[in-house]
């Protein structure tokens, strides 16, 4: 089960909204990334058609998951690799630990992987005495700061160069680097120098996988930095940790995803390194790892299969739904208390943790629908959040006041005459409480529980005559 | 396989099979046919450019990715083109070459270039490497390379500058053309270990979304296009 701290979502949201620096960081995701995405998508006339194809491929693959996984396993074995299966995070972490121990490894380098964040693999390995260093620049920064990712694509984008400078200064002092640099290019250079040594001294490289190709047994790694390629090439052991849902049938199907992933994620036409790896170094190869192991993780995914949230397994982790979400772009990823944030996190987290631990997240949505609109594989995110809200209600996790209020509303709703009388009465009451404001009447202070609404905004009083009375009079436009 | 391992595998497949049985949508025979003869998928027009403009499209796209390019009349003229590039960048005329007959037989000393064939990790920092490319992809501007005795993957990752030698007739349209090449080279151990599309210099925007070149890999990618 995934470890989450989502119960504190509302408290953390309040702090996030008041955090001016965080709000500046969020502008990048809320304003710039959606514009870049739209611009690159507009340059590809077949973009919508490719999204349809991607959705259909994922649906087909999930309906035939067993056959594709078996084919993938056979191809990996043929290439000299090994496939390991893990039901839970504990099993996955133990397998990786055992592989590292068998290799007498000490130093481990990692490239960015959300699945290993989900498993909390680093904590496990560090607890067993291994040195584990993240190599994606953003992940490296948050690892040094002991934070969780801010965004699945830009894990450290909430920090200023000044904060990164402080972090590097403290972390790199023991390595003999005494100069404090502030310039962004110099900070990248400092990380390059420090991590280059880590790469060269690493015994094991751990990567995730963006896709698994059943036809060929290849894993796909997509980065801009090239750190995944270094992790997959320099150490004598390469371990891939990923979810069983990452599989696609063939290379021709893979290209559909390659054409939509970077465009949806960062507005790039392609990422700078798109790489396919299969098996360990062959006799003919000039370099590469001696062993190639893939840990395929379930950790709740087979429970989603055949359930109302199965469509979530189509997710390719591009982050477009986060960038489009008015809630994510107001509170940021760390507020969610789960490594998966935004709309995709609001659906994944209850599935992988539990409804009781993550009930706040599916409620953190205005159901504006932007997430579904931008999702490259057209996941119906709002309707799945609604599913979790229903589960929450069924499990009596909704606050008493809300349940009581909804109960009264439902009771009234079943009695139309009474419902109309009650709403008419409420309309009269609201107009009595309201004051003229420009061209309309606004209620600035509601009594009782309604005070919660008018604390931070005014409520427009309903106008007369009501819609129903006009409808009866036949005043249709 | 240990007990844990076979238990885990069996349990995962049992759950998948139970879902399949409940909805009857799985079709193993159709899947096997698909894997043997992969059906084509929707292709965007950019992946099948007119051969007349294919090379030009590749050049434009490669420049957009931050590559520099130079034309070269024939393979024999490559060492001089490399020397010209290094001089223009004010960099010493010393390059790392893999064991690739296409390149090692060329007249490097005549162009004033010193060759190193030391492929140790420690020897590759800060240097310039010259390698052959497998294909240029017009759709994206990326260059495909694949692991072999003639292509150590680290030679495209550790040096500060990576120069790739690509023949104009090796420029293809889209990803699918590279899949054809890769499938043709399949042997009893399957696909080549590494197939990488290099889309320009290594970069990051992880600090304040500011793009900085030279994150972990080469700071500069130069393509020599041989007619």
Image: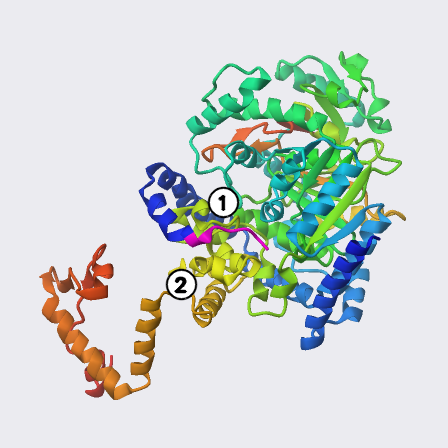
Q: Are both tags, 1 and 2, on one chain? A: yes
Q: Is residue B171 visible?
A: no
**On residue A185, which mark appears?**
none
Q: Residue at x 47, y 45 (%)?
A: A36
Viewed as shown, does residue A103 lie left or right of B208?
right
Task: Find the distance from the CA under tag 1 to the CA under tag 2.
Answer: 20 Å
Q: Chain of mark 1?
A: A
Compared across the picture, whether B188 is left or right of B181 comes to right
The type of colouring in the image is rainbow
- Tell me the SS state at disc 1: loop
Q: Relative to A373, does residue B55 appear above or below in the rendering?
A: above
Q: Residues within 10 Å of mark 1 (few under 14, many from 20)?
A: many
Q: Where in the figure is residue A262, as x and y percent of width and height?
A: 57, 47
Q: In the picture, which quadrant includes the N terminus of chain A?
A: bottom right
> What residue is pinned by disc 2?
A367
Q: Are marks 1 and 2 in contact (CB under 8 Å)?
A: no
Above or below, comparing residue B32 to residue A189 in the picture? below
The residue lying at 78 percent from left, 54 percent from top is B5
Is residue B214 a member of the stretch shown in magenta? no
Residue A450 falls in which quadrant of the image? Answer: bottom left
Does dot 2 land on a helix, a strand or a loop?
Answer: loop
Residue count near mark 2 (Cα–Cα under 10 Å), binned few <14, some 14–19, many ≥20 = some
Front one among B148 and A115: A115
Q: Is residue A423 above or below residue B2?
A: below
N-terminal of the pair, mark 1 or mark 2, is: 1
Span of residues in magenta? A1-7
What residue would you read off at disc 1? Answer: A151
Percent coordinates x, y for residue A124 in the rendering: 64, 41
Residue A138 x/y as whole percent: 53, 35
Work out whether A405 lies above or below A295: below
Q: Residue B211 in the image: x percent, y percent?
A: 50, 32
């Amino acid at each position: 089960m995934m470890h989450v701290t989502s119960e504190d979502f509302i408290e953390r949201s309040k702090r996030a909204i008041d955090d001016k620096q965080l709000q500046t960081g969020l502008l990048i995701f809320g304003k710039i990334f959606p514009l870049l995405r739209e611009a690159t998508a507009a340059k590809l006339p077949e973009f919508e058609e490719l999204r349809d194809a991607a959705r259909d491929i994922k649906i087909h693959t999930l309906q035939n998951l067993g056959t594709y996984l078996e084919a993938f396993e056979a191809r990996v074995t043929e290439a000299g690799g090994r496939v390991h299966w893990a039901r839970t995070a504990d099993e996955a972490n133990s397998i990786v630990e055992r592989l590292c121990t068998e290799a007498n490894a000490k130093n481990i380098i990692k490239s960015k992987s959300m699945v290993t964040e989900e498993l909390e693999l680093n904590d496990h390995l560090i607890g067993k005495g291994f040195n584990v260093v993240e190599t994606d620049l953003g992940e490296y920064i948050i690892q040094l700061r002991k934070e969780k990712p801010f965004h699945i694509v830009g894990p450290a984008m909430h920090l200023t160069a000044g904060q990164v400078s402080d972090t590097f200064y403290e972390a790199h002092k023991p390595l003999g680097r005494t100069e404090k640099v502030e310039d962004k290019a110099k900070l990248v250079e400092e990380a390059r120098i420090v991590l280059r040594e880590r790469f060269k001294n690493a015994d094991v490289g751990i990567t995730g996988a963006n896709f698994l190709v059943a036809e060929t047994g290849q894993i796909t790694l997509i980065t801009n930095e090239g750190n995944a390629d270094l992790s997959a090439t320099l150490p004598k052991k390469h371990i891939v940790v990923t979810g069983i849902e990452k599989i696609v049938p063939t290379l021709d199907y893979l290209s559909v995803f390659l054409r939509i992933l970077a465009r949806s994620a960062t507005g790039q036409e392609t990422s700078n390194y798109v790489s396919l790896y299969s098996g360990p170094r062959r006799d003919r190869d000039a370099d590469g790892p001696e062993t190639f192991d893939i840990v395929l993780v379930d950790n709740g995914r087979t429970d989603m299969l055949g359930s109302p949230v199965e469509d979530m397994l189509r997710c390719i982790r591009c982050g477009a739904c986060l960038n489009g979400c008015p809630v994510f772009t107001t509170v940021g990823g760390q507020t969610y208390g789960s490594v998966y944030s935004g709309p995709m996190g609001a659906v994944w987290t209850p599935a992988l943790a539990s409804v009781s631990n993550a009930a706040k997240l599916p409620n953190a949505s205005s159901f504006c629908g932007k997430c579904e609109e931008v999702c490259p594989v057209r996941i119906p995110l709002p309707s799945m959040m609604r599913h979790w809200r229903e589960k929450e209600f069924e499990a009596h996790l909704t606050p008493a006041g809300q349940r009581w209020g909804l109960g009264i509303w439902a009771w009234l709703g079943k009695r139309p005459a009474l419902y109309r009388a009650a709403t008419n009465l409420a309309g009269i009451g609201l107009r009595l409480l309201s004051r003229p404001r420009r061209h309309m009447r606004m209620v600035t202070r509601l009594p009782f529980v309604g005070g919660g609404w008018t604390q931070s905004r005014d409520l427009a009083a309903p106008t007369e005559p009501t819609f129903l009375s006009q409808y009866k009079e036949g005043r249709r436009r | 396989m240990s007990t844990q391992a076979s238990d885990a595998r069996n349990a995962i497949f049992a759950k998948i099979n139970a879902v399949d049985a409940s909805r009857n949508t799985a079709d193993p025979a159709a899947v096997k046919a698909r894997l043997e003869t992969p059906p084509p998928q929707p292709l965007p027009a950019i992946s099948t450019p007119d051969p007349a403009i294919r090379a030009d499209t590749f050049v434009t796209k490669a420049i957009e990715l931050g590559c520099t390019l130079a034309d070269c009349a024939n393979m024999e003229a490559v060492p001089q083109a490399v020397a010209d590039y290094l001089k223009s960048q004010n960099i010493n005329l010393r390059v790392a070459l893999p064991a690739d007959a296409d390149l090692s037989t060329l007249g490097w000393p005549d162009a004033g270039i010193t060759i190193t064939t030391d492929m140790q990790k420690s020897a590759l920092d800060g240097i310039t490497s010259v390698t052959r490319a497998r294909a240029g992809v017009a759709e994206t501007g990326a260059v495909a390379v694949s692991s072999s005795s003639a292509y150590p993957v680290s030679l495209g990752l550790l040096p500060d500058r990576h120069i790739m030698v690509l023949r104009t007739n090796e420029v293809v349209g889209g990803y699918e053309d590279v899949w054809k090449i890769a499938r043709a080279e399949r042997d009893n151990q399957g696909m080549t270990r590494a197939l990488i599309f290099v889309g320009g210099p290594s970069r990051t925007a992880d600090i304040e979304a500011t793009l900085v070149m030279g994150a972990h890999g080469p700071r500069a990618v130069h393509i020599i296009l041989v007619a």
